[in-house]
Structures are given as C-alpha cells and as structure tokens.
Image: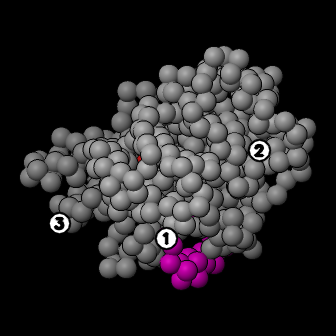
Amino acid sequence: MPGIVCKFGGTSLADADQFRRVRAIIEANPDRRVIVVSAPGKRFAQDQKVTDLLLICYDLLDKHLEIDPVYNRIRERFRDIAVALAIELDIDALLDDTRTRILKNPARDFIASRGEYLTAKLMAAWLGADFIEPADAIFLLDDLRVHPKTYQHLSNLLSTKKLSVVPGFYGKNERGRITTFSRGGSDITGSIVARAIAADIYENWTDVSGFLMADPRIVPNARQIDELTYKELRELAYMGATVLHDEAVFPVREVGIPIEIRNTNDPHGPFTRIVATRQLNDRVVTGIAGRKDFALFQIEKDLMNKMIGFGRRVLQVFESYGVSIDHMPTGIDNMSVVVRAGNLEDKTAAIVEEIQRTLEPDSIEVFPDLAIIATVGIGMIHCVGFAGRLCSAVARHGINLRVIDLGASEDNMIIGIDNRHFDAAIRAIYHEFVG
Ligand code: ASP
C-alpha cells in the first residue's frame, strides 16, 4: 500500500482558496495518502510568510518585548482560513495554546516550527485526516542528518490506509528538543516521509510547473525540464535553482523514489520528474544555474606539483577558519580556492596571512565579486568539443573566464566570471546549447 506523498509549499497554502485547491488535488487521486505541509506563504508580493512573522516573534521575545502585535497577524491568517472553510476546529483555543507554549518555550526552532504545526492541524481537521506529530517520529542528529530509526517510526505511524497530514520543517533532536531544518526544509520532510512509506512518487506541489532550464528572469521563455536525474537536480539546486531544497533529494535517492515538481495552480499542466537514471536525448545541457558573490583565492608556487601535502595544508587553513570550500581547480604550479563571500565574513586577510606564513607561496591573490555558473547535463561527457563551445560562447560576449572546472564526473561544467557579467554569460550559454 505505498501510495503517493504530496508536499505543499507555502504559496500553495497561503489562503482558503489555496486550501481548496489542495483538497481538489488530494481528492483527484486516492493514492495520494500522505500530505506534508509548509506554513502559509505570501498571498501577494508585499505579504509576509507566517514563518517570517514567527521569527519576528522570536526576536521580540529575545529582547523581552511584547509579541502580540505580530502574533495577532499570524492569528488572523489562520482564523481567516478556518472561518472561510468552516473548519470544525476550535482555532482560537489552538492559537491561544500555541501562544502560551511559545511564551513558555521561547526557543527559536520551536517558535519557527509552529507555522507548519498549525497548518497541519487545520488541514487535518478540514480533510478529516490524521495529524502526525513529527516530534514523535522524525529524529535528527546534531548536524540535522536523519537518524535511521526515523523511517521505522514514521512507517509505523503511517501504516493505516487513512489520509494523514504531517507538518514539514521540523523534527526532534537528540536532546528531545524541536529542531528545524534550514529554510525551505519542508521539502526535506516530504522526502523523508516518502522514503518511510516507500512511496511510489514524491509529489512536490509548488507555484511553478517544475524546473526551467534557466532562471526566467534572466532567460525569458526558458524551456521547461521534463526529466532530470537526482544528480543533475542536486547540482542545479545547489547552484541556485531554488524550486526544491538542495538537500531534499537524499532520502528518496537512496531508494529510487521519483520526485515530481508540480504546480498547485495548474495541476494538469506540465511538470518536472526527477529520477535515478534517464535516457540521453539530443539535448546535451539539462539546465544552467548560478550564484553571485564568491571569492577566488589564487595561489602560485613553482614546483607545487612535487610538494606533497601542499594542497592539504592550504585547505587546512580554510578549515581552521571554519570556511567551507565550493571549488578547487588546480594547475601544476598553482591552485585556486573558490568560497562563498558570505562565509568569509572578515577573515580574508587572516587567511591570506596564514597561507603566506605557513606555505610561502610565490604569490597569492584574492579576487572578490566572482559569479559561478554551472552548466549541467549528463550527456556532456559524450559530447566532443562541449567545453570549447561553452567557452567560445562566453568569449564572444567579451566575458573573461576566471575559473573553468569540468569536475570529476564531467556532468557539470563550472565557470567563474565577474559578478557584473552573470546574466550575459547565462544567456550566452543558453543560446549556444538551447537556441
Ligand atoms: N516555512 C518554512 C520556511 O519558510 C519551511 C518551508 O516552507 O519549507 O522556510
């Protein structure tokens, strides 16, 4: 009796009309038997997400200030939905109780998790479904990896045929406290739940019809991606394609459950399917994604190739400052380290000084304001001249390449360019390979 797990994102739950759409989607297919919900998102551009309002409550409490002006806005969001849908649930009692608990336990993750909790309570009451408490079943290690016992616990709780609703975004840590994933983490909950029930499909319902080959704000009318592999998804999501949380792929990937990204506002429209393996087609590039604001450390030292341990010692310096590394293209007498500028804070000078002191390079230079673009596609390994075409396409626009990295698996070609050329480079690559 595996069935389908459906996760609905914040915009799909933003108001009563969206709740109605969710119900229609669930009722259209009896295999859809577990629902994972986010907290209500924005109803219009200037609106605030319920999670953001809850985080403001946390900040207020932290400063010993009154939360009610903000908590009342959260109250209104849930009351509006409950009243419009005539949901049989004492919503005021639930909101009062939640407020009391927040005041008693003003921990950041606990407060942040209440949006999902309240949404799931409301949805379960409306659909006549079971409410499943993630704190009883989703056990998280300190680094937010899932404790393996989670799957058995969840599977036991979800073994009935009855429709169930699970709040996304949180679980319980090893000290028994509510812990949230990073923002957008309900996608991870959906994946964990799908794996626990060995679902046939993990449907992730959002406000777009799947992944596009490039950001439509940069490439208007960018094509839809019909199918991509978990690996391609991971590369694109990590590099800025924000439709799905970049860690959501792991629980389902281990057991090969396909993910479908579908549009709540166009349930019969196109969607993207994410699978373990796919047939190669004539399109070499699956998608293009990128991020701005990296820094490039370029280190030169003659005969570096013969110095055993040089690379390790460079990396150790970054490690000792707690800075994680994104890319590390190397040459014979030089190596480059690419890191996110946001992770560096004000440590750049200290890192440079320590590399100079301990490794005595011939030179070390830092280039800030670097953008990284990943061009992803499992077909590129078979495509003779791929890298040449990509570099020429960018060069034709007068854009200087600071980094080129084809990676070890040859399904993701990374280039680094100045931030200011970001959009033009993405467009150049798109037009070269997609037309
Ligand atoms: N509500 C949380 C957020 O806004 C989690 C989620 O939506 O996935 O990040």
Task: Check residue 151 for magenta coloring.
Answer: yes
Residue 38 visible to the viewer: no
Q: Where is mark 2, residue-wise?
A: 377
Give the residue at x 52% y 33%.
Answer: 371
Asked if residue 94 lies left or right of residue 237, the reply is left
Given residues 369 and 235, the one toward you in this image is 369
* Mark 3 CB near ligand 1 (8 Å cut): no
In which quadrant of the rendered view does residue 391 lie?
top right
In which quadrant of the rendered view does residue 383 lie?
top right
Q: CA distance from mark 3 to mark 2?
A: 50 Å
Residue 145 visible to the viewer: yes
Residue 145 got which mark? 1
Q: Position of residue 123 (x, y in %)?
A: 49, 55
Q: Position of residue 153 (x, y in %)?
A: 54, 81
Q: CA distance from mark 3 to mark 1?
A: 28 Å
Label 2 residue SS = loop
Q: Which residues are magenta?
A: 145-166
Q: Where is mark 3, residue-wise?
A: 104
Label 3 residue SS = helix
Q: Position of residue 102 (x, y in %)?
A: 23, 60
| Circle 3 or circle 1, nearest the eye | 1
In the rendered view, would you say 360 is above or below 377? below
In contact (CB < 8 Å): disc 2 and disc 1: no
